[in-house]
Structures are given as C-alpha cells and as structure tokens.
Image: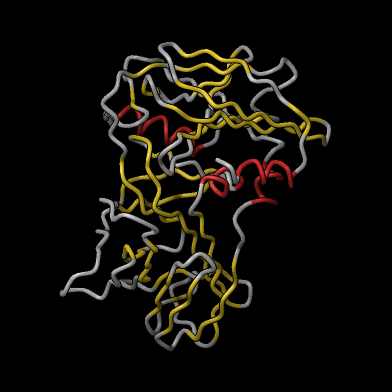
Amino acid sequence: MKTNLIKKMILAVIVVAGVYLVSCNKERLIRPSIQTSNLESFFKANAAQRQSFRIQNSQYQSITGSKGTILTFRPNTFVNANGSAVTGEVEIFLREIYDKADMILSNKPTMATDGILVSGGEISVEAFQNGNELKLAPGMTISASFPKNGTELPMKYFDGQEEDGQVLWTLGDTTITVQDSSNYCMPAYYCLELEDVNWANCDYYFNDPRPLTDIEIEVPENMNDTNTAVFLVPDNDNIVIRLYEFNNGKFSVGWGYQVPVGLKGTLVAISEINGNFSSAFLHTTITQNHYQSLVFSPTTLAQFTSDLSNL
C-alpha cells in the first residue's frame, strides 16, 4: 500500500535535483513498493523513549531531555486546536534520536527529499492538556538546543512530517545558530526555533564526490517489504539509509537515489515471520552495480539491540 507520505517524497525527489551521499538520478523510473509492514509494531515498541514533562503555560520554563536536548518555552506558548488560549499545566512529550541504533529502532533514517543527511540529532515534540493535543500560538516558537557531541558542523534545520510511522524530512526556513556575542545559544549546542510541534532534524547534507551506483540486496524468498526492513549504515558518519524499494526478492534504496562507489558500511536487516525475529549484519564496501545476498540468523530484541550498539 503506497502511503501519501511516499507519494510526497517521490514528487519531491523528481522536482529537486542534487548530488549528495545518495544522489537523485532523474532518468530512472521511480516505483517504490513500500507497504504497511507488520514490523510497524516492532518499530513502535522499540522506538526512542517518549519522555514526559509538565510545564505551566503561563511561565517561562526549560526542560532537558535524557540525551541533552534543551527546550525552552515562553509564556503562553500553546493554544488549543481551536486557537483559544489555554491556562494551567501542559504535558510535553519529547523523543530524542542521536545515534544509529535509535534511528534504526525508531525507523527514522536520515533521508531527505533531496539527499541523505548526516545527523546531529532528530527530535519530536508534542504538547497536550487533558488528553487534547495543543499547537503553538500564532507567532510563537519553541527554542531548541541540540548538544553538538563533537566537532562543530554546518548544520541545517529539517522539518519532519510523520505519516504511518515514516518521516518526510524537508529543508526548513529556520536558521540554526551557534554561540556568539549576538545570541543566546550556549557554546556546546546548535540552536534553532521550532515553528511547529512535530519532528525536527539538526543535520547537514553529506556531499560525496565519488561515482554513484545502484545497489541490490537479495533476501531469502520468504522475506519481503511487509516483514523485513533493510538499512545501509555507513562507517564514519551518523547516517542511516533505509532500502525502501522491493522487487523480485531484492531491496534497493528506491526514489532514484544511488550510493557512492567505495562507501564502506554495514548492511543491517531485521525480519519478523510468525512472531520469530531474525537479523543480518554484513560489513561491505559498495562496488559498481552492487549486488549482495544477506544471510539471516535467529535473534532476540536484546541481541539485536546489542548488535546495533556495535555499529
């Protein structure tokens, strides 16, 4: 079943040309076969933790997530669905995704409409009062600070709209700032203003000059895109690529994207058949017209999570 999200991604890829880590080839016919997967329950159950905080909507307050994300709320940040002001306590839900393991377990690869992203952090922000979802008041923003976790990089803001567990990342208008004498941003953070309560991504495009190629990954005949997910995880950058397209027993990236020849990384796959899980981990170097078969072994959630931590 093709979702509206995938249709939007296809249209965006056709419209936007670019050469990034995985680049768009406009001459290819793009026919993704993504379906609603019985792995959805797996991804929902094992996604990055949904952390809960409570704030007073009339006050200036900050919260800090378990992985270091800081959100700052100004007085009267939220209104209800009808646009009316709300008073009293508001419950904030925050998800933080900073590493490859959480990207895979949450099914949140770093794939934008116009290229692959090197992630500096993905977050989701939601707000509720008495079980009713809230939105930002007109002209209001939430200040978000992402820990740098290393060398300062040329980050950009990507907005994420979620549908059927998948997120479409698109380059946003908001500027990401770093600390200087003219702004509030602390030295160890990237800072931006969230203009919506949804997904946000602090990333940059990885521009790879090497020649590009298609890849095909073969899986056993009882596996398909309804019970199996395949990812390519490059070695040296905080990147996760999901191979969405499935045809004739083989997965490929789809959407017209190609992968640089010479890229080193690990193919990671998880499959659920009749309630039994199996996985595959294979380190590889991408060659021209790359073709590879995966061999799966029985696994448990604990073992799979442990294996992901070694990426």
Q: Is residue 220 left or right of residue 53?
A: right
Q: Quadrant of the N terminus?
A: top right
Q: Quadrant of the C terminus?
A: top right
Tell me the quarter of the picture where residue 53 sits: bottom right
Q: Is residue 111 left or right of residue 303?
A: left
Q: Residue 72, image x and y in percent?
A: 40, 76
Q: In this view of the protein, which residue sits in the foreground, 20 or 165?
A: 20
Q: In this view of the protein, which residue sits in the foreground, 306 or 88?
A: 306
Residue at image location 56% in from the left, 80% down from the top? 54
Residue at image location 59% in from the left, 68% down from the top? 51
Tell me the quarter of the picture where residue 150 sits: bottom left
130 lies above or below 3: below
Q: Residue 41, image x and y in percent?
A: 71, 45
Q: In this view of the protein, which residue sits in the foreground, 176 or 80?
A: 176
Q: Is residue 101 left or right of residue 57?
A: right
Q: Is residue 164 visible?
A: no
11 lies above or below 123: above
Q: Residue 237, image x and y in percent?
A: 40, 41
Residue at image location 75% in from the left, 19% down from the top? 222
Residue at image location 64% in from the left, 14% down from the top? 249
